[in-house]
Image (tube, helix red, strand yellow):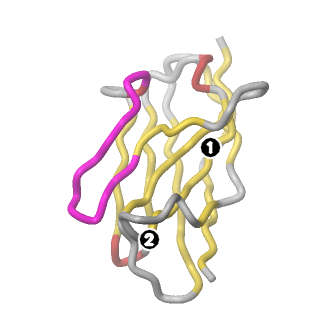
Amino acid sequence: QVQLVESGGGLVQAGGSLRLSCAASGRTFSWYGMGWFRQAPGKEREFVCAIYSGGNTLYVDSVKARFTISRDNAKNAVYLEMNSLKPEDTAVYYCAVKTSTTTAWNYWGQGTQVTVSS
């Protein structure tokens, strides 16, 4: 079993920055992708960004040029640097792992709250 633990959420004013971290632990696993999703109140969970084993990244349009995903393979960790935050970025942010190209995002963290005040 793989456990994912997010940290780094909090309350920030619009225009501010936050850095989320996600540490993976448990049985040794190889991963195809590590990503971030978010769910705002009353809305469905949405994809935010991901980084894949080849190093390529993917972002939803609404966060491009503001958010940066990175990884530390030695620590089995993934990070999300969020800049120029907007109130509409307010959500619970979840870390997820995709272990192969043929699976869905199959491991999830418990989420961390990000609140951006106007």
The residue that appears at 40% across and 31% down in the rendered structure is: 60
The residue that label 2 is drawn on is: 99
Mark 1 vs 2, N-terminal side: 1
Determine the CA span between mark 1 and mark 2: 20 Å
Name the front one of labels 1 and 2.
Answer: 2
The image quadrant where one finds the N terminus is bottom right
The residue type indicated by label 2 comes to Thr
The residue that appears at 43% across and 59% down in the rendered structure is: 34
Image vertical order of residue 33 relative to residue 10, above or below: below
Q: Position of residue 36 (x, y in %)?
A: 51, 47
Q: Quadrant of residue 109?
A: bottom right
Is residue 56 inside the magenta stretch? yes
Q: Among all residues in the image, which is located at the extreme top?
A: 118
Q: Among all residues in the image, which is located at the extreme bottom?
A: 27
The residue type indicated by label 1 comes to Tyr
The residue that appears at 46% across and 64% down in the rendered structure is: 98
Q: Which mark, by number, is residue 53? A: none
Q: Position of residue 6 (x, y in %)?
A: 61, 58
Element under disc 2? loop
Residue bounds of the magenta highlight: 50-62
The image quadrant where one finds the C terminus is top right
Element under disc 1? strand
Q: Quadrant of residue 75?
A: bottom left
Describe residue 46's horizontal placement relative to residue 84 as left or right.
right
In-front residue for pair 69/81: 69
The residue that appears at 68% across and 32% down in the rendered structure is: 44
Q: Which mark, by number, is residue 93? A: 1
In-front residue for pair 75/51: 51
